[in-house]
Image (cartoon, helix red, strand yellow):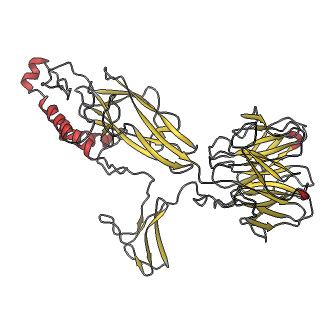
Amino acid sequence: MISNPCRKLGVESLERRALLAASILPVSEMSQAVPETDFFVANDFEAESLPVATVAEPEILVAFKGQDVGAEGNDSAVPTGMYFGWMERGDDRPVREFEIYNSGDSDLVLGDVEVPDEFRVVHDDSAWPGINVTQVVRPGHFLSLKIEMLTNQVGAKRGTVTIGSNDSSEPLTSFMISGDVGSDGAEDSIGLFHQVWSTFELKGSKYDDSIDRSTTFGPGRSNEWLPVTGDWDGDGFDTVGLYHSRTGVFHLKNSVAPGDADHVFAFGPAGNAGWIPLSGDWDGDGVDTVGLYQPGESRFHLIDSLRGGAADHFFSFGPSGATGWKPLAGDWDGDAIDTIGLFQQDGSQFHLKNDLSGGAADHYFAFGPASSDWQPLVGDWYKTGIDKIGLYQPDASLFHLKGSLSGGAADRYVQYGQPSHYGELIPLSGEWNGRHNSGLRNRPICACITTGPIQTPNIVLIYHGAPFIQETTPATVHPPSGSPDVMSSQSLGSDHTSPSARAEFWETESTVRAEAEQDSLGHEGVVDRLLTEWDPSL
């Protein structure tokens, strides 16, 4: 087995390549040693003397950016493995390409490629076909594969890629991959709705007592109007809304300001049926919509767009006929999709679900005093990408916020509001200051190319969410060299590999061309290309 044939660039690798070239026996000697066999001799590059002929064997080498990541005992100063970088939840999935090289002298047969959770081997957005898949890499050839990291859950991604093969000395080759996914920069804060005045008082930060935003919206002096908050237009800012229980109509605003509602629609029964409104992003598209909880049947009715009509999600969760249970909505597992929960008032117990269905709760715990009038609320208080819970103590106008889905003492206490307004205030939570990426789950990417003048006041070409060309009128944006002399657009991904004539293994015609090119280069030439064509900036 090769210990590390392509461990690093420089003189050492050049010497090894020379040894590789010198290790190929003349045809006459090969026929005498092992008749009718085309093979490398034993290719231990670190041997002090020329190797001797052995039985033909495949040798697996896994390389990423010119570094051997698969062999054990790597003494290079550069750490082995792949790092996918730090991404934000919901960003474009980063992709890394690596190559499996056969430096032996018989066919290398690859079996399963296993990757850790939250990674996958892909081609054209399709996952690696899975178990019992074999690919053959001819001697002196390589196979390019790509791995992408999923970004729908916050956390450190760490694990091992394992590749099975018929290399007798290394039937399982493995290397480490890692990456990090953070939250979208959102930090929920708190607020209060005053039912008498129909006033929303919102805190931009939960760490002080100031009122950052205050607006009056709705008629006031009626307990028929219940507050809801959410990001109704996907701009990254949570704003306000009201549900009129007597008519079953939602009135939603795209700003924290007085005036007419931006969205008005009926959903649910009229006539003060006692249904309770809630809001959340039920389908993970970055836009909040609404729903209703039917207490008598403990049933949820949720819609994926701001409209009336039939519910998109309809299920029961919790005991029928129970009183004093209040609906909740939040992202309990960091997958960018809000699900539901219930707060049991008499036991101060939280029952939370990770999907939109009935059945047993995924999280169940008690927090706060039983048989009290404390009110529940939900928010991502610490930018983790996972919503937590809290309680509002009305007699002291005190918020008790938890940093985990568990019981015990609160992690933070925030005094906000006037206890003298006991019974008139409803607690709220939301991203009043907005996410720092303007609420987009995926950054806008655009590159516009034209050879003629563009008569617009301002042209901004965006790459990875940042402008890279900006001109004012009159403006002419010229295509890069080699581009067609026509107006066109380019789709730019969030991760790039250097252009290469190497073909993917699943495209038959491209595979034939790639193999012909590799044959013309020879073994040493393929090693040279493998180690020199990688773009270290990727």
**Image quadrant in which you'd find residue 33:** top left
Determine if residue 103 is in view: yes
Residue 263 position within the rendered picture, expressed as x and y whole percent measured from the top left: 75, 63
Q: In percent of the image, x 51 and y 44: which residue is there? A: 180
Picture quarter with the N terminus: top left
**Image quadrant in which you'd find residue 35:** top left
Q: Which one is in front, 7 or 517?
A: 7
Q: In percent of the image, x 72 and y 35: which residue is there? A: 363
Residue 282 position within the rendered picture, expressed as x and y whole percent measured from the top left: 69, 48
**Image quadrant in which you'd find residue 299:** top right
Question: In the visual, does 90 lie left or right of 49?
Answer: right
Residue 377 position within the rendered picture, expressed as x and y whole percent measured from the top left: 78, 48
Q: In percent of the image, x 48 and y 78: which residue is there? A: 456
Q: In percent of the image, x 49 and y 76: which residue is there? A: 458
Determine if residue 307 is in view: no
Question: In the visual, does 304 lie left or right of 135?
Answer: right
- Please say if 340 is above or below 476: above
- Please say if 114 is above or below 209: above
- Could you tell me how many numbered marks the image carries? 0
Residue 405 position within the rendered picture, expressed as x and y whole percent measured from the top left: 71, 39
- Please say if 62 is above or below 65: above
Q: Residue reaching furthest bottom? A: 474
Question: In the visual, does 277 lie left or right of 32?
Answer: right
